[in-house]
Image (cartoon, rainbow, N blue to C red):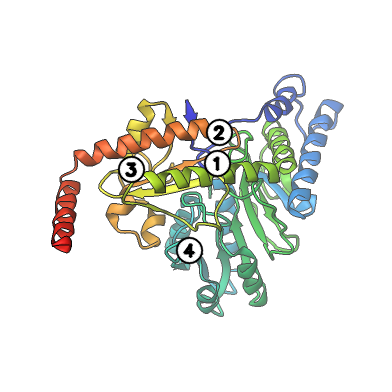
Amino acid sequence: MIYLDNAATTRTAPEAVEAMLPYLTEQYGNPSAIYSLGSAARKAVNQAKRTIAGAIGARPEEIYFTAGGTESDNWALKAAAEAYRDKGRHIITTKIEHHAVLHTCRYLEGQGYEVTYLDVDQDGLVDPAALEAAIRPDTVLISVMYANNEVGTMEPIEEIGTIARAHGVLFHTDAVQAFGQVPIEVDGLHIDMLSASGHKMNGPKGIGFLYIRSGIKLKSFLHGGAQERNRRAGTENVPGIAGLEAAAVRALGRMEQKAAKERELRDYLIGRIEGEIPYCRLNGHRSRRLPGNVNFSFRFVEGESVLIMLDRKGICGSSGSACTSGALDPSHVLLAMGRKQEEARGSLRLTLSEENTKEELDLVAEELKEIVGRLREMSPLYEDFIRREGRQRSEGSS
Ligand SMILES: *Cc1c(COP(=O)(O)O)cnc(C)c1O
């Protein structure tokens, strides 16, 4: 099997599994208990908080563990909207956010909030000037993702943070794809809230965190016990938290070498596809791009068909976000980038890890070339297109 779907989820690192095991077995104490079995668990949670906080230049008391990126996004948006509703009910986000943000915004619209969904350019970049122009006296929250999960484009977070701060508007970023991949420093970037998830960075699933800058008064997301400083009730997911910490330590320790390796593999695969498969187009910004992201549209083919045929060869990819796979909806991200329906449907995302090899990518490039060729042979649209091209060429030469 060749796994190229690391934006959907990653292989759990052995370090993370090992860190979790004691808390799944002997160290089963409840962190709220006062006997030593409990305090061992409490220590693990506090230690993880210090590690995570250190990773983004925050303080431990600003880190809240959640059940993953989706919960962190929901909490940040809903709680900020509620907390500042007397100041205003306007929220700014973008058209290319993950559904965890977009669908939460739709929900808030139903609750009487107004949401501006910013356009992006053809590379998927948000324009900071357009963002600034959208700010109104009643704007209470700006939410822009750090890096896009489909096309890998990295947004101008520092500029956006600076604008938000200058206007006194809260700034949240969904950094699920970026945390552990690129260095993040919340103060320098003027980030007020940040969402991250364990399973996108070789940690376990069902665990993540939300950073909330101290001084920001957000209500609890879950009501119940006094865990997480009264803001997120429920007995802590101690094994998950230990696994998340170990994954973060691992990712931070090898961030540069991992990114360099992935970038090299990424650019190699992009080069082979562009060089050998005609009528394709790279989606996403060429350089401001996550190290492991490759995303192409192939004309005259459906992304779903390519995926199914790749799967028969043991190659795992995606044709958009995991949330829409199964449905034949074209990607909302590609449509926002101005791609035609046809191009948005013919897209393929391959997201690499440092564990992939050049040999694997050679095989993928060969298979892809053959699959796209075979699918095009069956396409009446492609047949028409080639006939017209041929006619034009012979007219041009006569
Ligand atoms: C995966 C993902 C999420 C959701 O995270 P979960 O931990 O799976 O809930 C949110 N935002 C982005 C950008 C993602 O890639």
Q: Of tags 3 and 2, which is closer to the observer?
A: 2
User: Badge 1 is on which residue?
Assistant: 265
Q: Residues within 10 Å of mark 1 (few under 14, many from 20)?
A: many
Amino acid carrying mark 3 in the image: Gly
Amino acid carrying mark 1 in the image: Leu
Q: CA separation, marks 4 and 1? A: 30 Å
Q: Are marks 4 and 3 in contact (CB under 8 Å)?
A: no
Q: Are marks 1 and 2 in contact (CB under 8 Å)?
A: yes
Q: CA separation, marks 3 and 1? A: 22 Å
Amino acid carrying mark 4 in the image: Thr
Q: CA separation, marks 1 and 2? A: 8 Å
Query: Within 8 Å of ligand 1, the CB of disc 1?
Result: no
Q: Position of residue 79 (x, y in %)?
A: 60, 58
When the figure is inspected, residue 81 is found, relative to residue 48, above or below; the finding is below
User: Badge 2 is on which residue?
Assistant: 356
User: Badge 3 is on which residue?
Assistant: 303
Query: Within 8 Å of ligand 1, the CB of disc 4?
Result: no
Q: Of tags 4 and 2, which is closer to the observer?
A: 2
- Secondary structure beneath label 3: helix
Q: CA separation, marks 4 and 2? A: 32 Å
**Which residue is rendered at x = 34% and y = 59% of the image?**
339
Q: Position of residue 270 (x, y in %)?
A: 46, 47
Query: Within 8 Å of ligand 1, the CB of disc 3?
Result: no
User: Badge 4 is on which residue?
Assistant: 94
Amino acid carrying mark 2 in the image: Asn
The answer to which of 358 and 26 lies nearer the viewer is 358
Q: Position of residue 145 (x, y in %)?
A: 55, 57
Is residue 114 shown left or right of residue 77? left
When the figure is inspected, residue 227 is found, relative to residue 168, above or below; the finding is above
Q: Of tags 4 and 1, which is closer to the observer?
A: 1
Q: Are marks 3 and 2 in contact (CB under 8 Å)?
A: no
Q: Are marks 4 and 2 in contact (CB under 8 Å)?
A: no
